[in-house]
Structure formats: structure tokens, C-alpha cells
Image: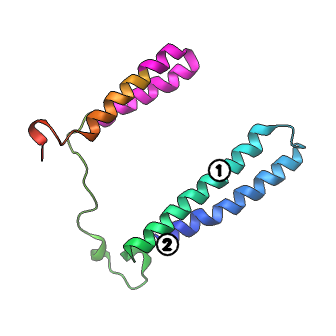
Amino acid sequence: MKIESKLFLLMAPFFLLVGVVYGYLVEWMEPVGFLALFLTAGMSLMVGYYLAFTARRIGMRPEDRLDAEIHEGSGEQGFFSPWSWWPLVLATACAAGFLGLAVGWWVFYIGAGLAVIALIGWVFEYSRGSHAH
């Protein structure tokens, strides 16, 4: 994860510099553009710090070593629910939420309620029913 953390940590000064140049060019009168660039720099710093912290915690991966072989990266990469419908429900809820921002707040509230139900269902999917552990 070292290359990923370096990539994100090096993007932060770039976005900061571009935000300053943009702000100077618009004479700091248009706040959305330079503020969005400053926030992008901050998000890049947060992601880069998280990746660097995780890289120190888990150690070197095969992707980080020059002498690694392809077969060293094989095996289980994580656990993914193969028959879960909850991600689709959550995506529908997020779509309804964003639609609500454009159409009306009542649609947003329906999407938010559906998102809460989808998150609870997804988190507790393997605690009840036929897939319980």
C-alpha cells in the first residue's frame, strides 16, 4: 500500500496549489471552486494517511516488493456476500436520496429511511436466517 499512500499524499499539495492559483485567478470572489479544491486536498490527505497507517500495520504486500511472484498474491482477498440483495437496496435508497435533493425533500426522507433499513439489513445479514454464523 505504500505506492497508493504516496500517490494520495502527493496529490494533496497539487490540489492545494491549484486551489490557490484558482482562487487568485478569480480574485477569491467565486468561493465554490477554490473551496472544492481545498476540500479535495484535505480528502486526499485523509485517504493517504489512512493508507500509510494501514501499510505500516499489515506490512509489505506482494505488490510492494520488486522480487514478488504472481502466485504470492493469490488466495482469499476478502469475504463478499454472493447472494446479498442489500447493496442493491442501498443503491436504490441513495439514488432516491439524491433525487430528493433535486425534486423535493419528501423523496429525500423516503430515501433516507430506506437507507437505514438497507444498512441494518446488510450489517445483520449473517446474524439471522439461513446464513447465520
- Residue 71, given in percent of the width and then of the height, sits at 27, 75
Say which of 78 and 74 sits in front: 78
In depth, the one of 54 and 36 nearer the eye is 54
In terms of secondary structure, where does tag 1 sit? Answer: helix
Instruction: From the top left corner, tell me how far across and down residue 109 is, in percent.
Output: 46, 19
Q: How is the image coloured?
A: rainbow
Question: Which contiguous range is marked in magenta?
Answer: 86-110
* Of pointers 1 and 2, the one earlier in the residue sequence: 2
The answer to whether residue 93 is magenta is yes
Q: Quadrant of residue 79?
A: bottom left
Q: Quadrant of residue 30?
A: top right
Between residues 67 and 4, which one lies in front from this camera angle?
4
From where the camera sits, is residue 20 visible? yes
Visible in this render: residue 88?
no
Mark drawn on residue 26 = none
Give the residue type that dot 1 points to: Thr
Q: Badges 1 and 2: C-beta atoms under 8 Å apart?
A: no
Task: In the rendered structure, find residue 40 and report the number of the disc placed on it.
Answer: 1
Instruction: Pinpoint residue 34: horizontal percent, then vertical percent.
Output: 76, 45
Label 1 to label 2: alpha-carbon separation: 20 Å
Above or below, 47 relative to 113: below
- How many C-alpha atoms fall within 10 Å of the one at disc 2: few (<14), some, or many (≥20)? some
Query: Is 1 included in the stretch rendered in magenta?
Result: no
**Quarter containing the N terminus:** bottom left
Label of residue 2 in the image: 2
- Badge 2 marks a residue whose secondary structure is helix
Task: Name the chief secondary structure element in magenta.
Answer: helix
Residue shown at 21%/45% (left/top)?
A: 82
Count neighbours of disc 1 (C-alpha within 10 A) and say few if under 14, some if 14 to 19, many if 20 or more.
some
